[in-house]
């Protein structure tokens, strides 16, 4: 039986049926069964970037490798910047921010705003929600099926709901906030 192809033209892993949902290259980058993986992280990230229309610059390749080689995770620009410096890849914080926003616009990442001053970037761009652990500044995924949102307001004329992000803030029992 021939393999199905994803929206980006790459073969889908055996046992996966084609659906209306696009298979993003980052999902295939992590899938060890896909024929697209070469075993070379930079080559795989380069292909992923090309497939979403981003030029694979040295900065995008290095930051993409740092982001996606570790599986699903939530990072801030500051965390990624620190990882890049530790990996001996000198890059400015402004470049990290720009790259994260470019990856978000290309649907490789999801931006999750927790506080007005704290934004995380999620390498899992599928529909899901989050627990935010206050005091630890940590995000934990909640499957979309585990959250029910009813009675949404009607969006203003000319707009539609693009996505619903639920962030459930948690704190240890017995912790009081003043």
Image: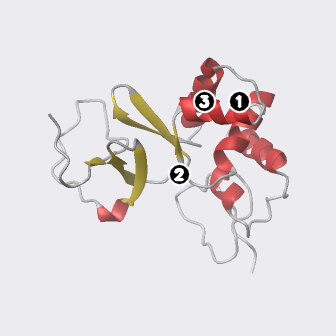
Q: Which mark is residue 102?
A: 3
Q: CA distance from mark 3 to mark 2?
A: 16 Å
Q: Nearer the viewer, residue 115 or 153?
A: 115
Percent coordinates x, y for residue 23 in the rendering: 61, 56
Image point 55% across, 42% down: which residue?
A: 109
Is residue 13 visible in the rendered image? The answer is yes
In the displayed structure, does residue 12 sit left or right of residue 141?
A: right
In the displayed structure, does residue 118 sit left or right of residue 94?
A: left
Q: Earlier in the sequence, mark 1 or mark 3?
A: 1
In front: mark 1 or mark 3? 1
* Residue placed furthest toward the front: 174
Image point 34% across, 48% down: which residue?
A: 133
In front: mark 1 or mark 2? 1
Question: Circle 3 sits in a helix, a strand or a loop, which is it?
Answer: helix
Rendered-image quadrant of the C terminus? top left
Marks 3 and 2 close (CB-CB < 8 Å): no
Q: Which mark is residue 124?
A: 2
Location of mark 1 (residue): 85
């Amino acid at each position: 039986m021939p393999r199905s192809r994803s929206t980006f033209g790459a073969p889908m892993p055996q046992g996966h049926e084609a659906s209306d949902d696009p298979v993003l290259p980052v999902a295939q980058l992590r899938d060890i069964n896909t024929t697209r993986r070469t075993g070379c992280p930079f080559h795989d990230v380069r292909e992923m970037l090309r497939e979403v229309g981003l030029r694979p610059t040295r900065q995008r390749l290095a930051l993409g490798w740092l982001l996606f080689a570790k599986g699903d995770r939530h990072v801030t620009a500051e965390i990624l910047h620190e990882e890049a410096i530790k990996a001996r890849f000198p890059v400015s914080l402004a470049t990290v921010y720009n790259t994260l926003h470019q990856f978000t616009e290309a649907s490789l990442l999801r931006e999750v705003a927790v506080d007005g001053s704290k934004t995380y970037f999620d390498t899992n761009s599928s529909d899901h929600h989050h627990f935010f652990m206050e005091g630890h500044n940590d995000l934990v995924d909640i499957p979309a099926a585990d959250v029910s949102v009813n009675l949404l307001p009607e969006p203003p004329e000319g707009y539609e709901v693009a996505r619903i992000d639920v962030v459930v803030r948690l704190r240890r029992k017995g912790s009081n906030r003043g």
